[in-house]
Amino acid sequence: MNLWRVLLVCALVLAAAVDAQAARPAKKPKAPTKPQIAVIAFEGLAPAAARSAVETELRTLLPTTDYAVQPAATTAATLDAVKKLGLACDSGDVDCLIRVGALTGAAVVLKGQLSTNGDGFVLDLVAADVGGLRERGRVRVAVPAGGDERRASLESAVIGVLRPEAWRGQLRVAVSQRGASIVVDGVPRGFAPLSSPIELTPGAHAVFVGLEGFAAWKNTVEVRYADVVDVDVALVPGLTEQAPSFSTRPASAPPELMSAQVRDRRGPMRVVVYDVEAAGVEPRVAAAIGTFLVAELRKREHVSVLDSGELRALVGQGASTTGDARGCTEDQCFAEVAEALGADAVVVTSLTQIEAQTVFGLRRIDPAKQEVVGSFVSRVASGDTTALLPLVGQSIEGTFADVPLRAGLRAGVDDKARHVLVPPPLPPLLAGTLTAGAVVAGGLGAALGGSAAITWTQHAAGVEARASNERLAPLAATYNLLQLGAIVGVGAGVVLGSAAAITGAFTDWEGYNDAIPASGVRP
């Protein structure tokens, strides 16, 4: 009996303890503490007041990052103690900063050098990662004397040293000539048109744009953090300059290697051909050359060609040089479509008149590798348009030597191409009108001549019957008029017929003038 009482008492005590524990308020979890970042007092040739002001403003930006700013007094006290040990870190040595960070208990140490630059300053900022025993980031930024631009500059510096992977700006280069090489700081970045901006670290960057037959465009462009810089380039005819490049890859792969790649393909080679860029050359001539290039490429085995007319159909009628509803210019839309289609090659061609010569340039670009795998350049006399025709076959043969011709086809344009490039100047309507006029005039003259013959027969019969002059005189007058009309009609028919025969030799009977509109844009 006593045992049951003991058990009951124990149960009641245990229940009371559980209730008391449940009623006790739960402890709040401790908030995770942020790692500390120590800022060493800025040094440099700038006035002490300016150094202090920039350092204070930079400290106000640091709490927005993933770090807690160590109080300036704590950092200064540690530095005073460290200096007594002979560790001053005046040179900004990263190893020294790491030692200081370890002594102060900071995860990252920042050190800045501030110097004057006109009305503003230049800040050299370095961050040392104490735990990683390495340099976190190092930047140089221009710091204006004040205003929003000053804060934006310091924000850029903070991102640059703490998150260098995100320290980027963007450069958009729009070039009037398709296929131009775009090189930034000696590194090839693609060919115009670019479907997306180039990401760069903030600062000054040397930009080079070049194309065969055009003078190179070179300039230094300032890129800022989280900003987009737009550069519009219109190349002018001139001597070609070799683009600077740090790439050690060959300009083109050996033809036999490329042939093996083509033979191993499961589908056709997809080739996008842009309109021929014309500078100083009649647009109609450039459009005709573009048509011949497409036809020449379609003679190759396992090649699927998409020209600019078909690209416009895919992009839509809204595409234009000013942009469409999708927010891209025609060139950007073309580049996006070519990329979406998985084009294996892009062909860009230019015709540029330089003094007394026309430069014919063609590039075969690999869009995946963003490099030129084949190029062709030749010059002809600017007045000899037909001299461009042999270059069509030669350029395709030289840049697509890895792709064989289809059986039974011959490289090069045929004789009809000469008429398309330089068609007869007169329309068929003129020769047809002259021919119709000759037929009508000749027929009328013949009819009048027949009437004159009938009238003369009547006049002769009246003379034989000794008719009166009152009856014979009208017949004679009518005969003379009909005879004159017959002579004029037959003469006009002969003249118009001769003119029609001569005009026929200069008439575009095959419709070559309608094949390529004078505007140079194919429907």
Image (spheres, rainbow, N blue to C red):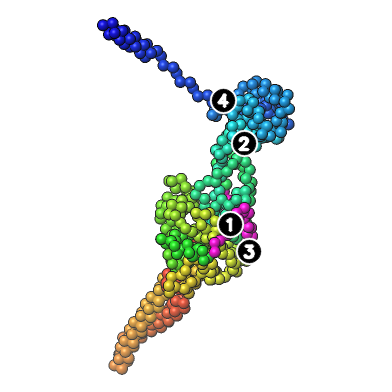
Q: Amino acid at mark 4?
A: Ala
Mark 2 → mark 3, Cα distance in angstroms: 59 Å
Give the extent of the magenta segment.
232-254
Q: Amino acid at mark 2?
A: Arg
Mark 4 → mark 2, Cα distance in angstroms: 20 Å
| Residue 513 visible in this rendered orientation of the protein | no
Circles 4 and 2: CB atoms closer than 8 Å: no
Mark nearer the N terminus (1 vs 3): 1
Quickly name the residue at label 4: 68
Disc number at residue 355?
A: 3
On the image, the x and y values in percent for residue 220 come to 64, 46
Task: From the viewer's side, name the closer residue of 329 and 406.
Answer: 406
Identify which residue is drawn at 57% across, 54% down.
181
In the drawing, does residue 113 fall left or right of residue 227?
A: right
Q: Secondary structure at mark 3?
A: loop
Quickly name the residue at label 1: 249
In the drawing, does residue 9 fall left or right of residue 347?
A: left
Mark 1 → mark 3, Cα distance in angstroms: 35 Å
On the image, the x and y values in percent for residue 154 come to 61, 32
Mark nearer the N terminus (4 vs 1): 4
- The majority secondary structure of the magenta stretch comes to loop
Task: From the viewer's side, name the closer residue of 219 and 45.
Answer: 45
On the image, the x and y values in percent for residue 394 come to 53, 69
Mark nearer the N terminus (3 vs 4): 4
Quickly name the residue at label 2: 134
Q: Amino acid at mark 3?
A: Glu
- Crowdedness near tag 1: few (<14), some (14–19) or many (≥20) residues, C-alpha within 10 Å: few
Q: Is residue 472 magenta?
A: no
Mark nearer the N terminus (2 vs 3): 2
Mark 4 → mark 1, Cα distance in angstroms: 47 Å
In the drawing, does residue 440 fall left or right of residue 168?
A: left
Q: Secondary structure at mark 4?
A: strand
